[in-house]
Image (tube, coloured by chain):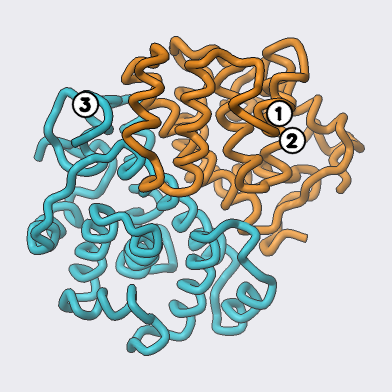
Amino acid sequence: MAYIDLQNDLPGIRGPMEYSPETGKALNELAEILLHNENNTLTRGERELIGAYVSSENDCFFCQNVHGAMAQYYFQSDMQFVDNIKKDYHTTPISDKLKSLLTIAGSVQKGGKYVTTEQVEHAKVLGATDKEIHDTVLIAAAFCMFNRYVDGLNTWAPQDRQVYVERAKMRAEDGYANMNLKK
Amino acid sequence: MPYIPLEEHLPGITGLLEYDKIAAKPIRELTQILLRGDSTLTEGERELIATVVSNGNQCRFCTAAHTAAADILLGENETSKNVKENIVTSPVSNKMKALLTIASMVRESGKAVTKEAIDKAKTEGASDIEIHDTVLIAALFCLYNRYVDGLSTVTPANPNFYKGLAERLRDHGYNRLSHGYDHLKTDKSTVA
């Protein structure tokens, strides 16, 4: 049960977003720009994967399942594909560039200072642009916020992981901005 | 040196917010609502939450910036110093001690926040919205601290830089300056 009376029974981040709509709107606008906006050389799937990976490292059940399901939807894969990436992305069939970006995201999850020049140089050698490195760091940092908001208020999350998979198509089509939190 | 090309006269977070103005917009709005919007917590109290979290994350730029902002809003520089050293013995209300304790737990991890810490805050008079805002401010600074250090931005050594920044935050909040930041090109205090 949530630590405060959210005056609604919506799961995960949607509970506090409905409770505090002004901040909720800004949070969803940020998610839209980082994850859903088409004007980005990283695919939606790649960006969702970064979010899912960081959420997994932060042990946030709700966020890793929402964004894992989004990645699964965009990659047209199964749940195992995303689970393997969360477990050990080095051994998965994703591009070397994406692996190098996940390494940076994993460092950001631990703390900003964990990102090294070597990690950034390696990503650049593999073709990552400055903007892609910037976006990777900001997406990872943003999920360190989202995850803490969700778990710091002890919100509830559906335990059936299939629930998240079934919602992914709608979210992919609608995006995050001006989201109908009750839908 | 930053990992990506940022404007030299804009150290710390400002260079990043100018590098990506599109993402900066909701980040600035969120910060303005949380730290300057209507609240039963004072602006100084909310800056103390930002200070404690940034200090815990060892983000030198954010710690110096929000310490300076808290000092200018509180009109003294002892409280910010004390909360960074020891929340329990610092000269803030019991309610603020409880909220700063929650913020420190959020900094560690969302899952580190205990029911006992929440109950303590409620016993000391914290409202639900104050607890909500404390959690979200602490979470937001976990974003900022990682953004600033994850891209290895410059941290000016000159204390005058943070004084100028704090005055800007007092007078304009977290909104982007309508005339931008080109006037800072002549500011010599931005050098690391």
Q: Confirm whether circles 2 and 1 share one chain.
A: yes
Q: Amino acid at mark 3?
A: Leu
Number of numbered tags placed on the structure image: 3
Q: Which residue is mark 1?
A: B67
Q: Quadrant of the N terminus of chain B?
A: bottom right
Chain A colour is: cyan
Q: On the picture, is B33 further left or further right than A160?
A: right
**Mark 2: few/some/many CA within 10 Å (<14, 14-19, 20+):** many
Write down the chain letter for disc 2: B
Q: Confirm whether circles 3 and 2 share one chain.
A: no
**Residue B186: x %, y % from top left:** 89, 35
Tell me which residue sits at (41%, 26%) in the image: B133
Q: Which residue is mark 2?
A: B64
Position of A31 relative to B138 (above/below): below
Q: Which residue is mark 3?
A: A6
Q: On the picture, is B183 further left or further right than A61?
A: right
Chain B colour is: orange
Which quadrant of the figure has residue B69? Answer: top right
Q: On the picture, is B125 further left or further right than B185?
A: left
Write down the chain letter for disc 1: B
**Mark 3: few/some/many CA within 10 Å (<14, 14-19, 20+):** many
Write down the chain letter for disc 3: A
Q: How much space separates mark 3 and mark 1, taking CA atoms?
A: 32 Å
SS category of the residue bearing label 3 = loop
SS category of the residue bearing label 2 = helix
**Residue A58: x %, y % from top left:** 39, 58
Q: B78 or B123, which lies in front?
A: B123
